[in-house]
Image (cartoon, rainbow, N blue to C red):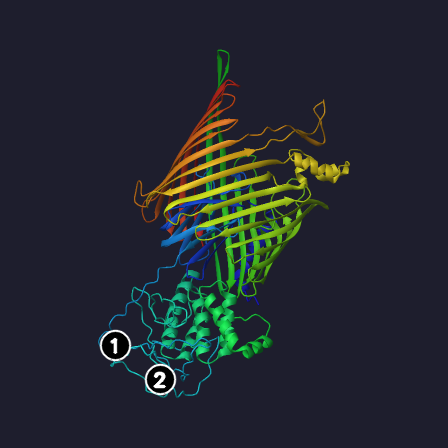
Amino acid sequence: MFRIKLHRLALSFFAVILLDIVSPYASAEIIDDITVHQDASGGTDTVIKFTVPIQYLRHFPQGKSSSTSIYFNILNTVPIDEWQDYESHRTPPSDLVQEIMVTTRDRGTGPKIHITFYRPAEFTVAMGGDNQTLVIHAKPVTAQQNNESKPAPGQSIVIPVPVAAAPIAVIAATPKSPPVSAPSAATPAVSVAKEMPPAPAPATVSAPVAASAPVPATAPVAPSGDITAPKIVLKPSSSKPIHIPLGGKDGLPPFPEIDQYVPQGTTPAPANASLTDKIVIANNQAAALMENGGNALLTGQTFAAIDSFNQVLNLPPNKYTEDAQLWVGIAKERSGQLSKAILEFNSYLRLYPDGKSAKWVKDRLAKLKLSQPALFATLDKQSTAPARAQNTEFQYSEFGSLSMYYYQGASQTNTVASAGAVQTPTNFSLVDQKSLITNLNMTARSYNNEYDNRLVFQDFYAANFLPGQQNISMLGAAYYEMRDRIVDYSFRVGRQSGLGGGVMGRFDGVSAGYGFVPNWRVNVVAGQLSDFTIDSKPTFYGASVDFGTKSQLGGSVYGITQQVNGFTDRRAVGGNLRYFDQRFNIMSMVDYDVLFKAVNIFTVQGTLNGGGSGTDYNFLLDRRRSPVLDIRNAINGTTSTIATLMQNGWSMSDLILLADQRTTVSSMAQVGMTNHMSEKWFIGTDFTIAKTAGMTASGTLLPDGTTGVEGFVPTIPSTGNTWTITERATGLGVIRPQDTTNFSVSYSRGALITAEGFQASNHVDLQEKWTLDSTFFLNLQNDNTGGKMHDISPTIRVAYKIRRNLSADTQLGLDWNKTSSSVLQSTSTALREFFAFGFRLDF
């Protein structure tokens, strides 16, 4: 069934198995997967799945641009210093999306995603169906009416004859025409894999012609009797799309506008062609065939139209696949093949349940069922299996990226300690970083119109060259995934991220799902958490049900059980509810722990889009236990183990009470707005209130300083409410044409600290292959003991694109910090200098 070319995937599969064995840890990369596909309207959807929950904030530039940066918050407890430095992922080959670069180490501007398009595109950004997905939708090129131009002298004229409007019950059948004779040079012969139409008997009735359709006297008109095959000429279109006057006003859906193409027959793409080239070639060939089929329908040549639409369906998935699936059904109904037309219409609904013509197809099937109930009953008895379109040939692709960066940093600290009138200076110098960081991402894919198979591998390796530091190898993903597009089932086996269903982190295991009815899907998951944890790594199993999967309103419910060393570590139920449309989206999530009888996570977030002008708003309410509630939290901050406590008589209720005492609560509320002052300037305000609750002392501390078997964790005070207000401005073309510049000022106040901050950043394309990024940060901070801290940090990064798939860059920066403490009566000045250089290769 899978028909995977194993010799093309063997290298990737071997690497996955080998590195899965030698890499016991999971990296802190925040990107799980990136997919690019066309939607029903011909636009391009880039779907970015994260390994952690996020909150989308804003993106800039908006509207139409060749690139954009997307800003977001990470709603999780991943430490900032564990995020990958310039984590990068190559997107699947696309004729629109060129590159996605994820930067997560810029603590001043926050995490962001930078996307580069091959050409300027009009796009929107929104959250997906859960809180771990972003969807970047690039709109299709606006269809324009193609004004017919006068033919050149001597050029043959083909006059399309409009077809009469169809009756309500059955689409008007046109006379069956004889098969088209030997193809001309403009219409090369093609081997049709899907279906060859039967040779019809000569018709004796002329094609119906609309009474109002004017036919010039000079136009060749077929005599009454046999219908002659029209000469359907494949020609390169003008700069405007080709318009075929079919549908719209005759009871049929509008025929698609045909993009410009160069006639090249149906010669398959070379075996060594890239996937991007194959997509371009398939779109080019499909455009010519769609024009053929449309003209054939206009002139009554239904079997010629069926032949053309079938050839489109036998090409690799392309821009016109959905339209061909619709119009092959219409053509078969017109040719009198009603049963085959019904099967084609059913196939359209299964493949494109929310397609642009789904409503028309449903209405058409309903009318046919009323007029032909016996035929529908016969078809139902013949087969209960889903109606499937003819499978296209499998396409194969392997793509990925390799990046290697060398980092080195050195710091010098000067401290002056005061004791009365005596001052004691000390100096300290240190090389604090020497490391080579390698990121490898690989995907091998085999797919057709029904099946999609993938092998995915992500690995991180840090070679440390400082004495006493260990090298680190972290396996982020290593899994095989298979999806059935028609029956709607899928499964994934290997190391993967927990994308919902109550799974808290990466795991080694299996996840599967099945769409048992339209808009509903059931999922199961089982495995062992692979992220580093205290004590033993827990195993788990769970199930969930998704509803409204293809609707604006939807969500999911789940239940999960997690175990460690034979005892139940976590048992929870939860779910999410979301609504989204073009301007507004809102999503809520709750996770309730049955063992602790407490809410583990509760979050609500939403955005209101001003529609390209006006003001955008976003908000977030988030309350969660940190870390996630489970029994193993009972040994947080100690060297004990759960097994040791149980051996010493601790009951499950005792462990639950201790774990609850050693788990804090973090809460945050945020409201933000962004105003579109002009095409070049955006200004915005963010207001945030955050609080981390304190924890009372837990455990036993004996007079001699020793502790009980459960250890001792001292009291940790609450941070109190800390509120922050940030004013920001983003400009396009401020310093140089097409550059992006950000300014922001912030003020924070809480029970422990008061802080002010300023930051500025600029991204500019110096030349065709050179880019420059520069940042500047200034932070001033006072604490409640009278201490002060001043910090200044400028950074510059220069990148050069050596080839289309190979780039190199270097980064230089320094961090100057001055702190003073009234309690310690000391002043310290530190200067850290750092640099990095490396390359990124896409393959």
Q: Position of 504 compared to 825: left or right?
A: right
**Rendered image: mark on residue 818:** none
Kind of residue at disc 2: Thr
Q: Quadrant of residue 517?
A: bottom right
- The residue to which callout 1 is attached is 155
Farthest residue, direction top = 421
Few, some or many residues within 10 Å of mark 2 (<14, 14–19, 20+): some
Residue 151 visible to an observer of this rendering: yes
Q: Residue 177 at what x, y percent from top left? A: 40, 83
- The residue to which callout 2 is attached is 228
Label 2 element class: loop
Q: Residue 236 at what x, y percent from top left? A: 31, 69
Q: Residue 62 at what x, y percent from top left? A: 38, 48
Q: Between residues 567 and 171, which one lies in front from this camera angle?
A: 171
On screen, residue 202 above or below 74: below
Few, some or many residues within 10 Å of mark 1 (<14, 14–19, 20+): few
Q: Residue at x 49, y 44 (%)?
A: 55
Q: Residue at x 60, y 54 (%)?
A: 494
Q: Residue at x 36, y 75 (%)?
A: 295
Q: Position of 562 compared to 299: left or right?
A: right
Label 1 element class: loop
State the separation of the CA atoms marked 1 and 2.
20 Å
Q: Quadrant of the N terminus?
A: bottom right
Residue 565 visible to an observer of this rendering: no
